[in-house]
Image: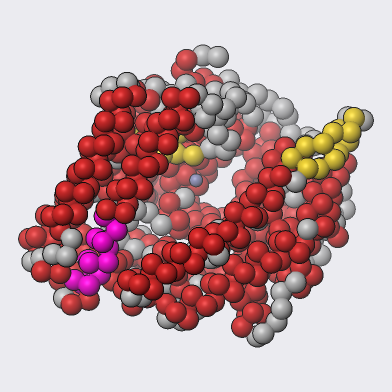
Amino acid sequence: MVEEMRWDLAQLVESTEPEKIVAKFEEMVTEANNFARKYKGKINVLDVEGLVALLEARDAFSLKYEGAMEYCSLRYSADSIDPVSKRLNEAVRKASNKVGQALAFMEIELGSLLKAKPGIVNDANLEEYRHFLERIMRRIPHVMTEDLEKLTITKDQNGVSAWSQLQGDWLSTRMFKIKVDGVEKTMPYGEIISHYQSRDRALRREANRVVYDGLGHDAIVWASAIRSVCSDHLQMCDWRKYPSPMTQSLIDNDVEQEAIDALIRTMENSVNSYRRYLYLKAKLMGLEKLGNWDIIAPLPSASEKKYTWDESRKEVVAAYRSFDLEWAEWVDEMYGRRHIDGEVRNGKRSGAFCASWLAGKSAWVMQSFNGQMGDVYTQAHELGHAVHAYLGGRHQKPSNYEIGSCIAECGSVFGELLLTDRLLVKANTREEKQAVLATVLDEFGMAAFQVSARVFFEKSMYEAIKGGKFLDGETVSSFWTASRDRIYGEAVEWLPEMKWEWTMKLHYYIPNYRFYNYPYIYAQLFVFALYRLYKEKGKAFVPKMRTLLAAGSSRSPTDLAKELGFDITKEDFWRKGIQQFEEFVDQLEATIKQ
Ligand SMILES: [Zn+2]
C-alpha cells in the first residue's frame, strides 16, 4: 500500500522516541500540579488582570502538550496492536487523568468568582474570553455542593456508568446466525450489520430480522438499563434544578430551548417531504414501498465505480476549490503533508474522524478508504472538519475552540454538499446522477428525519416515568414505534422485530448524555439553509461562511446565526433547510421523467 495513504505523525512531536514522550507527560503532570499550587483557593480574589493571566496560562498549557498527546492517541487509533502504541496510549490516558484531577478545582472556583462578580464578564480586557466565561456562568445554578458532586461521581460509577457498560458488553458479545451465499455463518453484531448495505435485498432483510429478533430475546436486560438511565436522569434534574430533561444538553450545546423547539416543530411539519422521497426511492428500486431494510440501501442502478486515492483527492480538492481557493489549498495540504490515514489495515480503529491540531494550525483525518463513492464523501466530510480546524487554529485560542455539536458539523456537512455539486456536474449518466442525489438525500433523511423520531422517543420516556409508568421492554417498544411512525407514517414497511431497535442504540445508555440527538438535526438543517443561501448569493456568501467557522466557540450558535442574518428561534429559518432538501428531491424526480 502506498505511503501517501499513511499518516506521518512524527510532525506532532520533537522526537518519536517513546521514552522522550513519556518524559514529556511527566513534565505535563508536574506543570499541572504547580499550576494548582499557584491558583487553588486563590481564584476568587483575582482581579481582571489576574484572571486574564490565568486563562492565558491555561490555553498556553493545552497548546504546549497537545502535539504529544495527539501523537499517542492517533498512533493508537491507527494501530492498536503495536505494543509501543498500547504503552503510549496508556501513558497518555494516565497523565490526562492526573492533569484532570489536578485542575478540577478551576471551573468550580471560576464559577464562584463569577457568581460573586458577575459584571466581570463584560470587562473590556476579558472580551476575548467573554463567551467562555458566560458558558461557565450558565452552569453555576446547577452545580451542587462539593460533597454532593463527589457523591454523584461515586453513585454514577456503579449506577448509570455500570448500566452503560452492561449494554455495550452485552451487545458486543451477542452472536448472530445468518446464511450468506448459501453458507450459514455465526458472527458478532459489528460484523452482521455490514449486510444492511448489501446489494442483495433478501440478505439485507434477513440481517435486520436476525439482529432484532435476537436482541428482543434479551428485552429484560435492555429495559432495565434504559429505565435506570432515564430514571436516574430525572432524579438528577431535580437535584440540579434543571427545569426540563433537556436543559443539561442545551447548556452543553450552548443553545436555547426556543430554537430547538422551532427546529423540532419544523421537522414534524415537514414529514411529507421525506415521505415523498421515500416513495420516489421505492420507485427507483422497482418497489411499491420501501422495507425498513431498503431505507439506506444503495440504488440497484448505481454503478460500482471505484475511485483511486488520487482520483478522490482530485475530486475533493476541486469541490473545495469551487468555493474558496485557500480552503482548497488547506485540503490539498492535508493530503500532501500526509495528514490523512486512509489505508485499510488490521488493528486500525473502524469509522472515520478528524482531530484538530490547533498548535499546528491543522488537523488529522482517519478513515478506511476502499474507493467507494461513500469513502469519497467521508473524505470530503472529514476534510470539512479540517478546514474548520485550520480556521480555528488561526483565529481562536483553545478556550474558544470547544465547539458544541450543533456547530461542529457545519464545515463537514457543507463540504459534502460542495462535493455533491461537483459530482452532479460531472455525472454523465442518469444513473450516476441518481446515485449522487440518493446519497445526499439518504444521509439527510437519517440525520434529520430519523433522528427527529429519536427526540420524540426520548421525550416520551421521561414523560412516562414522570407519569408513574413502569417501563418494561414492550412499553419502551411501544414508544419507539409510535415515535417512528410520526416521521415515516405509511411510507415504509417495518419488520415486526424492528420494535426492538432502541436496544442497540448506544447513545441512550451513555451516562450524562441525554438528548444527544437534536444537534444532528440542527447541523443538517442549518447547513442545508446555508448552502441555499450560497446558491442564492454566490461568491458574496463565502466570507460569511469563513467568519462562521473561524468563530469557533467564541460566540453562541444563536449569535453566529444572527450575524448571518438568521433567527434560529423561528420556523421560517429552519424551513430554508427543508426547501433545499425538497430541491434535491425535485432534481431526483426530474431524472425519472427525463
Ligand atoms: Zn463529522
Residue 93 horizontal/vertical position (percent): 40, 41
**Where is 141 relative to 225, above or below?**
below
**Residue at far bottom of view:** 467
Total marks in image: 0
* Occupied quadrant, residue 153: bottom left
> Looking at the image, which residue is at 25% across and 69% down?
111
Judge whether residue 110 is colored magenta. yes
Going 85% across and 40% down the picture, which residue do you hit? Answer: 177
Q: Residue at x 26, y 37 (%)?
A: 26
Along the line of sight, which residue is nearer the eye, 526 or 426? 526
Q: Is residue 90 magenta?
A: no
Q: Is residue 564 visible?
A: yes
Quick check: 540 left or right of 465? left
Seen from the viewer's position, the closer of residues 219 and 126 is 219
Residue at 62% x, 69% y is: 228
From the viewer's perspective, tell me whether residue 327 is left or right of residue 210.
Answer: left
- Please tell me whether the stretch drawn in magenta is mainly helix, strand or loop: helix
Q: Is residue 29 left or right of residue 557?
A: left
Q: Which residues are magenta?
A: 103-114
